[in-house]
Amino acid sequence: MIKYQEHLLSNGLTLITHVDKSAPLVVVNILYKVGSRNEQPGRTGFAHLFEHLMFGGSKNVPDYDKHLQKAGAENNAFTNTDITNYYIILSAENIETALWVESDRMQFLNLDKKNLATQKKVVVEEFKQRYLNVPYGDVWLKLLPLAYHVHPYQWPTIGKEISHIEKASLKNVREFHEKHYAPNNAVLTISGNIDPTNTYELAKKWFGNIPANQNGHDQITSEPRQTSSRFLEIDANVPLNSIYKVYHMPGRINKKYITADLLSDLLGRGKSSRLYQSLVKDKKVFNDINSYITGSADPGLLIISGKVNPDIDIVDAEKRIVDEIDLLKNNLKETEVEKVINQAVSSTYFSETELLNRSINLSVANSLGNTNLVNEEIELVGKVKKTDILNMANEILVNSNCSTLHYKSKK
């Protein structure tokens, strides 16, 4: 059970405090409710670009890292489809340094030509290195638009194409910052060796006078139900043929989300999973195979991906995956369900030994509309039954709900 207090400042900023006196440390985590889902089809990659721009200095803190280094702080950030998250870990006595730099860049971010040009160059280079110049790097550039036709999950967080970043203007990024980087679109979680009452006063001191914006929430187009299978085949200079099969599944706020997550674990989490034991270890169809989920707020994807051994036909390899899914639907043991539930529970408890993870999880849960999800989800895991998993498998692991990519080697 993660204990916390929650407050709403007059400008709309949500403050969450979580006390942990085990070490003289504090985590200052600020989550902005903006990810790639909040972008326009012709201007993608902006949320991720801003993750970089936010480190370019602000009006009163021209060198962001300099002040944090003096305070002995560690900091970083990440962006995904739904959020952009920034965190600082530092000694409790230096907490106001973190609140100062975060509040200043929320309100007075340095958005000039030099900062924009520098960060655009960094992001374009990242796009090339991670998505274009490595084997299988462009998988999500191909697979997501196959699975999603209208929802903005149809492009990866890095963006749909490099030109969207290259053409980003000062006007574009200033409008994006004004719309999304505001107190009423943020969750500030402060955890560690703190006094909640004093921390609330500090939050008001540094963030309370920042004005809320009046832009309202983005209207995200829902993805229609997929009613027929989709298929794409591409050839590239990669070592092995690969198969990607993706199935639409419930989003994080759906009670069935946990069941779909456990289903993916049963299929392909680790070397003891069904797919690995059968298709890698026993039948040697695949060199490697796994199953995982995107974990998105809106309905996401359950993914099965595997690299096919050189002497195996890719069509036959895909058939073997489908056979294993059918076998699960018809022969699932209670012991398997118990094992995967125990794995999920222990993984959650282990991850929450880290103060940073608790801080991020509190922020994410709040962004989903219910901070107590950090406690409720683990309870829901323990309540999942064999029949729930079978029902989920029969609901989502069907051909009409599947998009398949054959990523074939030219070698």
Image: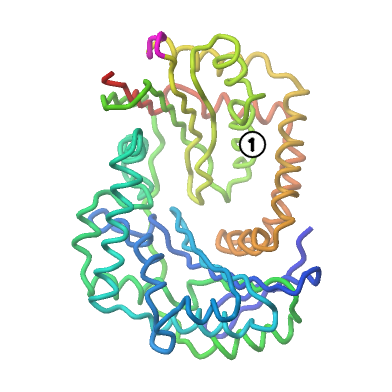
Q: Position of residue 28 (x, y in %)?
A: 61, 73
Q: Position of residue 215 (x, y in %)?
A: 37, 74
Q: Position of residue 118 (x, y in %)?
A: 28, 68
Q: Is residue 65 left or right of residue 89?
A: left
Residue at image point 76% right, 39% down: 383
Q: Which residues are magenta?
A: 310-314
Q: Position of residue 44 (x, y in %)?
A: 29, 56
Seen from the viewer's position, the closer of residues 215 and 344 is: 344
Colour scheme of this structure image? Answer: rainbow
For mark 1, give the secondary structure.
helix
Residue 11 versus residue 248 in the image, above or below:
below
Residue 281 versus residue 46 in the image, above or below:
above
Q: Main secondary structure of the magenta part?
A: loop
Does 201 appear in magenta?
no
Residue at image point 36% right, 39% down: 140
Q: How many other residues sit within 10 Å of disc 1, few (<14), some (14-19) or many (≥20)?
A: many
Seen from the viewer's position, the closer of residues 77 and 160 is: 77
Count of all numbered marks drawn on residues in the image = 1
Q: Is residue 286 left or right of residue 42?
A: right
Name the quadrant of the C terminus: top left
Q: Is residue 23 left or right of residue 287?
A: right
Residue at image point 57% right, 79% down: 98
Q: Amino acid at mark 1?
A: Thr
Residue at image point 31% right, 60% down: 122
Name the quadrant of the N terminus: bottom right
Say which residue label 1 marks: 259
